[in-house]
Structures are given as C-alpha cells and as structure tokens.
C-alpha cells in the first residue's frame, strides 16, 4: 500500500513538473516575440500574461508568492 502511494506521488510530481516547464516555455516564447523592439515592459507583460493563462489551465490551487505584485 505504501509503495503504491509513493508511486502515485511520483507520477503526480512528474506531471506537475512537466506542466510547469510548459508554463515557463510559453512565457519565454511570448516575450521573445517582442525581443529587440525596445519595449521591455511589453515583453515582460507578454510573459506574465502567458504564464498566468497557462497556470490558470492547471488543475491546482495556489498563490504566486514572488513577483511584482498581486492581481
């Protein structure tokens, strides 16, 4: 029984890790589209918007505890 619980935890951890990589990737791609245009704030906002959109799709409840402020 304990082995099964540990295995399930590992599976959940792997899935969550993969999803968080995807969130990061989407944020990077969104900001990269604005690279070289001289508008750092727009690039940052594009990354934040993409990250928030992707995080909202995950079946989790949480709070971002680092960043530039809550919404």
Image: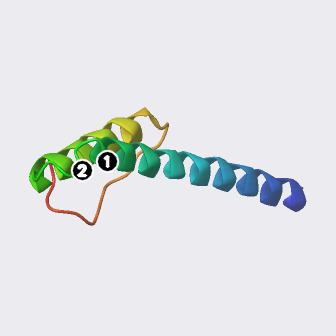
Image quadrant where one finds the N terminus:
bottom right
- Residue lying furthest front: 36
User: Residue 57 lies in what quarter of the image?
Assistant: top left
Residue 18 at what x, y percent from top left?
A: 60, 49
Q: State the SS at label 1.
A: helix
Direction from residue 58 to residue 12 in the image, left or right: right
Direction from residue 54 to residue 46 in the image, left or right: left
* 27, above or below 66, in the image: above
Residue at image position (32%, 41%) is 30
Q: Residues within 10 Å of mark 1 (few under 14, many from 20)?
A: some
**Where residue 49 is drawn, which disc sits there?**
none
Residue at image position (32%, 54%) is 63
Residue 61 at what x, y percent from top left?
A: 41, 45
- Residue lying furthest bottom: 66
Residue receiving disc 2: 35
Residue receiving disc 1: 32
* 30, above or below 39, in the image: above
């Amino acid at each position: 029984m304990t082995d099964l619980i540990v295995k399930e935890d590992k599976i959940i951890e792997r899935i969550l890790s993969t999803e968080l990589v995807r969130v990061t990737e989407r944020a990077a791609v969104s900001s990269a589209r604005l690279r070289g245009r001289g508008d750092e704030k727009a690039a940052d906002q594009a990354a934040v918007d993409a990250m928030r959109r992707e995080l909202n799709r995950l079946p989790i409840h949480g709070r971002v505890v680092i960043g530039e402020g809550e919404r």
